Amino acid sequence: MSYVILDLEWNASFSKKLRKFVNEIIEFGAVRLDENYEITDTFSVMVKPKIGKRLNGKVKQLTKISIQELKEKGVGFLTAAERFSEFLGDSTLLTWGTSDIHALFENYTYYTGDYHIPFLTSYCDLQEYCMKALDCYDEGNQMGLGACAAMLGLSFSEEEQHRAYADAYLSQKCLTAVADRMPLSECVLRADEEVFYDRMNFKNYFITDINSPDISRGDLRFRCDKCGKPVRRVKKWRLHNKSFSAEFCCKNCGRRFIGRVSFKKKFDGVKVNKRIVEIVAKADKAKKAQQTESVTE
């Protein structure tokens, strides 16, 4: 069993042909790992840009790459991809987050008209794996590579970050630091089937229609957080900031509260987030405001 951690650098280039910006890949950097996640080989190649004529200022600042260097040392994208394909072989591909894999989709689409990556057979999002291993996985708050390394107490150079080969090395350090916490295989996906591309290209979204068939009626019910009994909704559902809210009343203990629930549609189903919000009377609000003013003074 072997693995390859890939990191890409790209430049936002405007395509006249497509009439939109494309994340044009300008550098491949990768490390191959053995079954113990130790580095056995490295890979690096620059890509000569075809779409963009200049580099974005932020890209130049972060990577220290110049357009002249790319023209002199770079090869065409398909040539670079073919070389990487040979380096990858039948290894499982790992990237930090899914932005790099989507950049590959985008560049393959531009150059071949097909977003399928011909050499990809298995894939793992290393960012998701490390966050789950650290028990801090949160879809809405993705952890950057540097932040993960800092949390694990790993040393790295800020100056070297944002170059493909350096980020690939740092990703390997993060992997080895958490490898004993959960099996990597739990996050590995088969990538040689169409369902993989369906999953990767699926855009998560919040359901904003209360009558959507994707919403289970049971998820709109609440229990009293005081006595645990079922409660009755006494006001209509309202939509605010992609969440539904309504007032509920418990017949058993008289407790009243606002129940809030959101539904996020994902490839594998619907993620439901429910919470109870205290109802604060106007008199109590005025009292709290008065107390705040007194403290301020």
Image: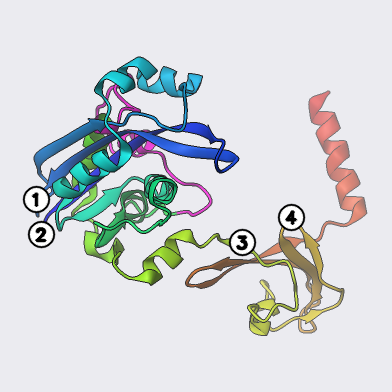
**What amino acid is labelled 1 in the image?**
Asp
How far apart marks 1 and 2 lie (CA) works out to: 7 Å
Sequence-wise first label, 3 or 2: 2
**What amino acid is labelled 3 in the image?**
Tyr
Which residues make up the magenta segment?
A: 138-165
Sequence-wise first label, 3 or 1: 1
Q: Are marks 3 and 4 in contact (CB under 8 Å)?
A: no
- Residue 134, how many percent across, how many down? 33, 51
| Marking on residue 241 | 4
How far apart marks 3 and 1 lie (CA) works out to: 38 Å
The quarter of the displayed image where residue 7 is located: top left
**What amino acid is labelled 4 in the image?**
Asn
236 relative position to 41: left or right: right
Sequence-wise first label, 4 or 2: 2
Number of marks: 4
Q: Nearer the viewer, mark 4 or mark 2?
A: 2
- Residue denoted by label 2: 1
Q: Is residue 222 visible?
A: no
| Marking on residue 205 | 3
Residue at image location 21% in from the left, 35% down from the top:
169
The quarter of the displayed image where residue 234 is located: bottom right
- Residue denoted by label 1: 34
User: Where 80 sits versus 257, above or below?
Assistant: above
The color scheme shown is rainbow
